[in-house]
Image: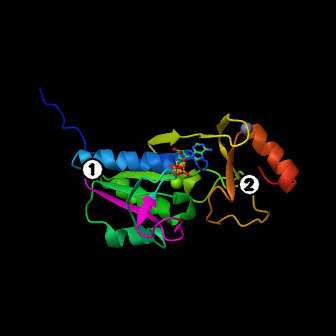
Amino acid sequence: MFIEPKKDNGWIEVISGPMFSGKTEELIRRVKEAMTNGLSVATFKPAIDNRYHEEKITSHNGNNILAIPIERPGLIWDHYQDQNIVAVDEAQFFGPELVGVVNALADHQVRVLIAGLDMDFMARPFGSLPELLARAEHITKLHAICHRCGAKATYTFKLAQNDKIVEIGERNLYQALCRSCYNSAMLNDRKAGPK
Ligand code: ADP
Ligand code: MG
Ligand code: ZN
């Protein structure tokens, strides 16, 4: 009997959720696991995210791996050297160009690992994430712990009274909140806005 060889498929996997939900930690865990397994990985991050270290991805509890900062997704091609896996952290900061690159990689047997915020602080779908979520084979939605009540948090609330969607910050600027705490915070602190 002829048994067809298993196809060596590429795919897209997305890790999403609010700030502090452990997206970077989970991305680092998957990258390290793959490397232990002998697979090669190229990891990227937007050049805009320089909170910790220029050439590293660092989680809120200090775990880190090397990453190449790029200004736009097309630059992935300048660094890609047939690695088995391409990982991108903070993918929400990239626009639609990322979707084409990611699809092309997955079509060529690359496992593409994406982490990013699914919503901005106004609870609107953020950057390339909605499209990537629609096209991904595997999706993991993580939750943080609500800063105000301890429930599962899915929203990122911005403490600063400005409307800049892209502003790099930590707990001084953002809180992870559950639905009801987010709604009250938006009403009380920001007079509500789009959701
Ligand atoms: P993300 O990439 O989603 O912003 P990280 O992976 O960088 O998250 O950090 C997750 C870590 O942040 C947790 O393991 C925990 O140590 C810490 N942390 C700080 N605030 C919170 C919170 N409100 N809920 C959950 N974890 C938090
Ligand atoms: Mg992160
Ligand atoms: Zn809450």
* Whole-percent x, y for residue 40 in the image: 26, 55
* Whole-percent x, y for residue 49 in the image: 53, 66
Residue drawn at point x = 35 percent, y = 50 percent: 31
Residue drawn at point x = 34 percent, y = 73 percent: 78
- In the rendered picture of this protein, how many numbered marks are placed on residues? 2
Give ligand 3's quarter of the image.
top right
Residue type, mark 2 in image: Met
Q: How far apart are marks 1 and 2 (CA)?
A: 37 Å
Q: Is residue 120 left or right of residue 193?
A: left
Quadrant holding the N terminus: top left
Q: Which of 137 and 161 is in front in this view?
A: 161
Q: Name the residue under label 1.
A: 35
Q: In this view, does 49 lie to the left or right of 123?
A: left
In the picture as drawn, the residue positioned furthest to the top comes out as 1
As for residue 21 lying within the magenta part, the answer is no
Tag of residue 122: 2
As for residue 56 lying within the magenta part, the answer is yes
